[in-house]
Amino acid sequence: MVATACYAQALGLKCIAMLKKQPNSQVVRRNLLLMHHFGTEIHLCPDTEFRTLQTIATCIEHKNNHSDFPYFMPTGGSIPVGILGFVNAAFELKRQIEEGVMPEPDYLYVAAGSLGTMVGLLLGLKAAGLKTQLRSVLVEPIENLKASREEITKLFKETNRLLHDADPSFPVWNLTEDEIYLNTDFTGSDYGLFTPEGKQALTTLQETEDIKLDGTYTAKAFAGLLDDASKGLCKNKVILFWNTFCSDDFDDILATQDYKQLSLCFHEFFEKEIQPLDR
């Protein structure tokens, strides 16, 4: 959401964010202040159902005031247009391989939330002609794994069709069940709730490589990688961990922000303690 807020401001666009309440953390505080800095109108919704209703009401209000509906971006930007970014990212990876920056990975580990990143890489790896196997680690519990796999296939086909319609020379690919790898062992009990395994993975990478992770997404993904490695699944393999966390601390911006300028409903994130595993 912060990236959307940042680029919307840069392009002179108004950004409205519908946020669902989640466990408190340093990253939550940071993101709220950054969205405020970038001029985003922020709404806090207690649950998914309320967020849906609030989004509909906001769209209608915008239509009445501006004679047009706003452009709607779902969670994570997981629609074909948004997914194109990670299709392109796979080609960036291919270029780095060709330039000798790294060998072609056998396994690529990445965090999976709204599934757009995963779908983009699945399609991009195929289109780029890479044999790399994608191993995605889910970051929140899901009620129906079968439905998630069906959603991945649906988004894959829709994104593939978008590219093929734009350029018929872009092939139409098939996605097999075996290519959809989803590790559900490291989600924790809720979105945004850190896990002991994720905390250990975060600490390990920070102390050994000085690379920052976040407890919501990338720490859980790296925990999945470490678990596979402990089982010998990564032995003699080239492994790529795709760190989707922006590790810039934004201290220069955050130093100028006052949380009391946010709506009152957001103050609790700054006045109450953060979750234990983030202290």
Image (cartoon, rainbow, N blue to C red):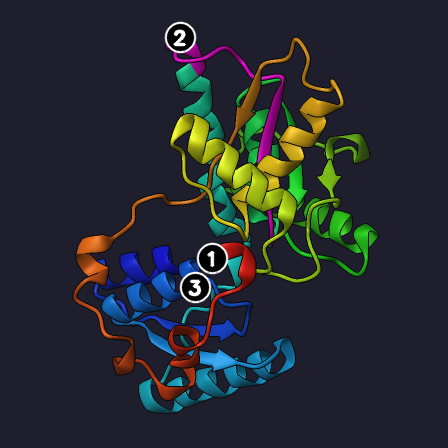
Q: Nearer the viewer, mark 1 or mark 2?
A: 1
* Residue bearing the label numbered 3: 28
**Residue range corresponding to the magenta coloring:** 97-113
* Residue bearing the label numbered 1: 279
Please, what is the three-letter code of the amino acid marked with disc 3?
Val
Please tell me whether residue 258 belongs to the stretch shown in magenta. no
Residue 69 lies, with reference to residue 32, above or below; the image says below
Distance of mark 2 from mark 3, alpha carbons? 38 Å
For the residue pair 194 and 81, the one nearer the viewer reads as: 194
Distance of mark 1 from mark 2, alpha carbons? 40 Å
* First reached walking from the N terminus: tag 3 or tag 1: 3
Please, what is the three-letter code of the amino acid marked with disc 1?
Arg
Q: Position of residue 204 (x, y in %)?
A: 51, 33
Q: Nearer the viewer, mark 2 or mark 3?
A: 3
For the residue pair 244 and 220, the one nearer the viewer reads as: 220
* First reached walking from the N terminus: tag 2 or tag 3: 3
- The reply to whether residue 172 is in sight is no
* First reached walking from the N terminus: tag 1 or tag 2: 2
Please, what is the three-letter code of the amino acid marked with disc 2?
Gly
Q: In the picture, residue 206 is in which quadrant? A: top left
Residue at horizontal 73 percent and vertical 35 percent from the top? 181
Judge from the rendering whether residue 195 lies leftward or rightward of residue 151; answer left or right. left
* Residue bearing the label numbered 2: 100
- The reply to whether residue 108 is in sight is yes
Residue 35 lies, with reference to residue 52, above or below; the image says above
